[in-house]
Image (tube, rainbow, N blue to C red):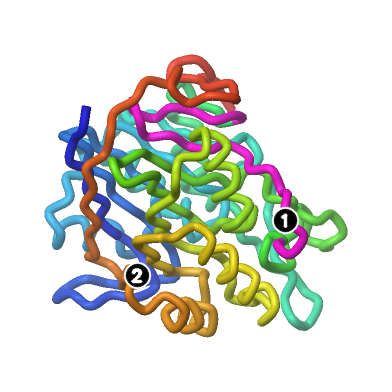
Amino acid sequence: MKDKLRITVLVENTTAGPGLLAEHGLAYWIDWDGQRVFFDTGQGNVLVNNAYKLGIPLRETDAIVLSHGHFDHTGGLDEALRTNRSAAVYLHPAALEPKFARNHDGTSREIGVPLLSQEALRRCSRRLVDTVSPTAILDGLMVTGPVPRATDFEDTGGPFFLDAACSKPDPLADDQSLFFETKEGMVVLLGCAHSGVINTLQYIGELSAGKPIRAVIGGMHLVSASPERVARTIEEFRRLDLRLLAPCHCTGMAATVALWNAFPGQCSMCHVGTTFDFDAISTQPSEIPQQEIVSGDKRARGI
């Protein structure tokens, strides 16, 4: 069965609409025939303002999915969960690990889930769902869970660590993306793609039994990527015959310009207030082959 699915960019680094605010972060609002899903929540500074301006009913959230445990994707959790106390939260357990980034001078800064968001998660611990494998959020809206690292040119995209001394590299096992099917093929929604955007797309290709990928929206963490990595990414995108490519957030200006130059007819803006409409296809988890699929009531846990 096909249904109308709309993705609204609620938080992003850029904006173009009257009264809308930007911040370094990302959040999407997904409305699929009256079912509402948050994918990430930004830093939390502009979430409520933008939701009000865009007419997004935060109180009607059915589920919240976190792409990974960095502050610019989880900072709005406290506000989102205060607005709606019944929404389930889908995340990989590693999202709650301490997370640090190394500065240019060798010092470090903490970049993990903010304290207020951690406390909000504790308050809703009975509604947490571990996404340790591909997981159905709705009948047809899937989260990948951990993405295998198969390419030889992708890494996590930066100097990320599990400790302040920067002695334990963070593999970002918590990185995950959303995907769903349309008549034309699969649509992929990225948080930061710390697993590598091509790794992510290849994995979704496996999960969907080789169905074509037609749209890729979101952060690709190419902000610090070498020209060689950007070129290889473009080469792999060409093989996919994409109809829509909407890079944003952590993709970085240089990589975004390269992508727009390489795919001028397929690229789209992805600032706050941008909407993407699709005729999505509802499927049952059993229709996604080759991997264990779990539904949202099977891995609830406490923290």
- The reply to whether residue 129 is in sight is yes
Give the residue at x 58% y 21%: 292
Is residue 172 left or right of 286 when viewed as pictured? right
Is residue 302 left or right of 1 when viewed as pictured? right
Q: Is residue 187 above or below residue 254?
A: above
Q: Is residue 246 above or below residue 302?
A: below
Amino acid identity at mark 2: Gln
Give the residue at x 49% y 57%: 240
Circles 2 and 1 in contact, beta carbons < 8 Å = no
Amino acid identity at mark 1: Thr
The residue singled out by tag 2 in the image is 266
Magenta span includes 293: no
**Which element carries disc 1, helix, strand or loop?**
loop
**185 vs 178, nearest the viewer:** 185
Q: Mark 2: few, some, or many residues within 10 Å (few <14, many ≥20)? A: some
Give the residue at x 70% y 62%: 154
Give me the C-alpha separation between circle 2 and circle 1. 24 Å
**248 vs 127, nearest the viewer:** 248
Q: Which mark is residue 151?
A: 1
In magenta, the rendered stretch is 132-154
Q: Quadrant of residue 19?
A: bottom left
